[in-house]
Every structure is written in C-alpha cells, then in structure tokens.
Amino acid sequence: MERSTEPMKVNIDEYDVIHYCYVCRQEAAQPRAVISMSMDKEVNGEVHLHKRMSLDHHGGPMIQDHRDNFHTRAFEIDDETENYETCARIVMDYVNKGFDITYLKLG
C-alpha cells in the first residue's frame, strides 16, 4: 500500500460549554476543544478535550445549558515526517493547560 502524499489537514474547534445553576442562576463557562486530523479517507483521528474544573454548585452538578464563543482554526501540515509529532504537540499543549482528553479516535 502506497503512502499518501497529501498534506495532513488539521481542524481545531474551540468553544465554551455554559453550565447553569438553577438555584442561584449563576453560569460557568467550561472551555472545550475538538482537534480533527486527516490525511485521506483511511488515515484520520479526532481528540475531544475539556478544561478540568469543578462544576458543582449548591451541593450538586451544574446543568449544561448551551455552547458559546465558538472559534475554528484550520491548517495543513506539508512535511509528512512531522505530521504526527506536530499533532501530538498540539494535543499536549492543551493537556499542559489543564485539559483532559474525553474522547480519542484514531484510524
């Protein structure tokens, strides 16, 4: 099987999930990110991350209400030897900022 010479396409969606407390009507924004990587139909991956934070309020969890502050970045990585290393660095940057990986799909 021949390797693809296509550049790796990387898409990063960042957004906040707004959580709501029905007792005091306070809101809290939890930052989240979805990183998608693809080279062709057979080689792709997706990583979902969210910021580690306490969302308990008045003795119970706050309720997810809506998404806000949606931003998308997209770019291509041309150098095949650096594709996976660069993507791993992007994910680790989020982990180092206090994000947890909540979903991982590699294929």
Image (spheres, rainbow, N blue to C red):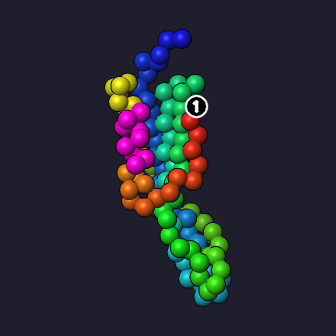
What is the x, y in percent for residue 67? Answer: 56, 63
Pick the quarter of the image with the N terminus. top right
Which of 75 and 3 lies nearest the eye of the viewer? 3
Q: Which residues are magenta?
A: 84-92
Total residue callouts = 1
Give the structural element (helix, strand or loop) at label 1. loop
**What residue is rendered at 47% in x and 16% in y?**
3
Looking at the image, is 43 positioned above or below residue 91? above
Q: Is residue 31 left or right of residue 64?
A: left
Residue in the picture at 39% in, 45% down = 90
Up/down of 17 relative to 7, above or below: below
Residue 79 position by quadrant? top left
- Asked if residue 75 is among those painted magenta in the image, a careful observer would answer no
Which quadrant holds the C terminus? top right
Three-letter amino acid code of the residue under disc 1:
Gly
Q: Position of residue 70 (x, y in %)?
A: 49, 57
* Quarter-of-image position of residue 45: top right
Q: Is residue 70 visible?
A: no
Q: Which residue lies most toward the top here? A: 1
Side (left or right) of 68 relative to 20:
left
* Left or right of 80 in this view: 15: right
- Left or right, 59 with respect to 94, comes to right
Residue 105 seen in the current view: yes
- Which residue is at 43% across, 61% downward? 98
Coordinates of residue 54 in the picture (x, y in percent):
53, 73
Residue 91, image x, y percentages: 43, 47
Residue, disc 1: 107
Residue 43 sits above or below residue 29 on the image: above
Task: Please identify the dominant SS of the magenta region.
Answer: helix
The verdict on residue 85 being magenta is: yes
Structural crowding at the residue carrying mark 1, measured as other residues with C-alpha within 10 Å and reported as few (<14), some (14–19) or many (≥20): few
